[in-house]
Image (cartoon, helix red, strand yellow):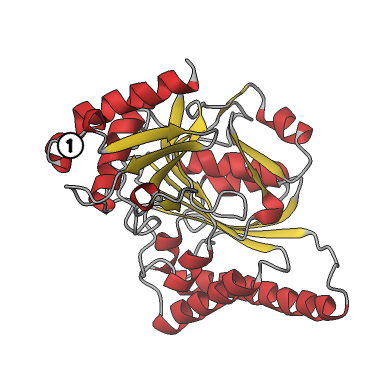
């Protein structure tokens, strides 16, 4: 399909789908036009117009165009109307609504042997899907959220296996489950509840380890003051089921935990000390808001709607995003200098690993 044919196809879809929202106006009477580029398409309204150019119109166009373009293109959902200036002297057409896209759709990685795959990927890239790889050098912290049975532990095991060769791992496992078994198989440090010890005692042990990480951050900051280009090895603090860790413990111990992970989230970026947090939800009871705001890789798997995305994606309306049905599917957002706004449908990798690690 040529660019011109694609523009005509989009116009036809919008003429039929917008209906009463544009009060009967269409491209046939020169009310709007569409222009396609490599990175997306622009909806060009001709002003003055008989309809409002607002967020409601933008989201409606997104829903129509995303379905019409699937599976050749995936539109990247925006939180609000994305205006762009148009290079023209005609005041009637000097602005447009931009809809960025990626060619194709999200495709799941199939990994026959996870250990071999991880050993072959010894750089800082973590493949997530066939068309998406995360550069760990650009990651501050990661969050994985999802309802019970959505595949959080399965995805966490994948991240642990990929991070093993690029980062020191400190694993906190309050449920004494999959992460602890993985740590045992891979000789990694794991902190988990011991028999005949209280939960507050366990979290105090976690706080002690987090305090050591804060001291390491301060040490590295001191070194960076004299050597700004100094490169440090990655350290990743992995906490599974954060909500289970903080519920029902002494208030002072919980406040200390919140204070420590806040310091790590805020100061760890330059010193390459990261958080990887997993929870059913990330409300204020599980982590401080300041920690959530510092995370630049956000993953929500399982059931996707306004309620489930309200913590990781508070400004996002997921309506219109085409998410495949199946286990280990959801949304991912990577916030960095290259792709600051993208929210993509996610298909978590399918892999095979050692028996006894993933239940």
Nearer to us in this view, 31 or 22: 31
Residue 211 at x, y percent in the picture: 64, 77
Q: Residues within 10 Å of mark 1 (few under 14, many from 20)?
A: some
Q: Which one is nearer the viewer's eye here, 221 or 147?
A: 221
Return the x and y of residue 205 as percentages of the image width and height: 58, 72
Q: Residue at x 66, y 30 (%)?
A: 114
Considering every residue shown, the one lying at the far front of the view is 89
- Residue hosting label 1: 25
Identity of the residue drawn at 72% across and 35% down: 118
SS for callout 1: loop
x then y, percent, for residue 61: 29, 39
125 is higher (above) or lower (below) than 193: above
Q: Quadrant of residue 237?
A: bottom right
- Which residue shows up at 20% across the image and 26% down it? 16
- Residue at 40% across, 66% down: 286
Q: Is residue 305 visible?
A: no
Say whether residue 351 is left or right of residue 219: left
């Amino acid at each position: 399909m040529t660019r011109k044919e694609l523009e005509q196809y989009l116009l036809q879809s919008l003429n039929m789908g917008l209906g009463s929202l544009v009060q009967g106006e269409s491209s046939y009477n020169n009310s709007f036009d569409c222009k396609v580029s490599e990175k997306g398409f622009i909806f060009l309204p001709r002003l003055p117009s008989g309809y409002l150019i607002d967020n409601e119109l933008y989201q409606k166009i997104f829903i129509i165009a995303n379905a019409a373009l699937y599976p050749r293109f995936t539109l990247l959902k925006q939180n609000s109307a994305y205006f762009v200036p148009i290079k023209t002297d005609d005041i009637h057409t000097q602005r447009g609504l931009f809809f960025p896209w990626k060619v194709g759709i999200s495709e799941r990685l199939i990994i026959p042997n996870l250990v071999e795959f991880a050993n072959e990927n010894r750089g800082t890239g973590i493949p997530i899907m066939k068309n998406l790889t995360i550069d760990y050098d650009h990651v501050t912290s990661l969050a994985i959220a999802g309802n019970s049975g959505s595949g959080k532990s399965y995805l966490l095991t994948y991240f642990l296996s990929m991070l093993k060769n690029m980062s020191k791992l400190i694993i906190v496992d309050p449920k004494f489950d999959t992460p602890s078994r993985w740590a045992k198989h891979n000789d990694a440090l794991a902190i988990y509840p011991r028999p005949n010890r209280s939960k507050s005692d366990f979290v105090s042990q976690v706080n002690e380890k987090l305090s050591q990480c804060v001291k390491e951050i301060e040490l590295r900051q001191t070194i960076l003051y004299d050597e700004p280009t100094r490169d440090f090895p990655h350290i990743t603090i992995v906490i599974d089921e954060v909500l289970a860790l903080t519920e029902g413990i002494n208030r002072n111990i919980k406040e200390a935990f919140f204070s420590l992970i806040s310091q790590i989230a805020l100061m760890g970026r330059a010193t390459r000390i990261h958080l990887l947090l997993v929870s059913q939800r990330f409300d204020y009871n599980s982590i401080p808001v300041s920690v959530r705001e510092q995370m630049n890789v956000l993953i929500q798997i399982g059931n996707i709607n306004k309620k489930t995305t309200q913590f990781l994606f508070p400004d996002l309306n997921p309506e219109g995003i085409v998410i495949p049905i199946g286990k280990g599917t959801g949304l991912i957002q990577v916030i960095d200098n290259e792709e600051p706004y993208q929210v993509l449908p996610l298909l978590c990798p399918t892999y095979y690993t050692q028996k006894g690690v993933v239940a």
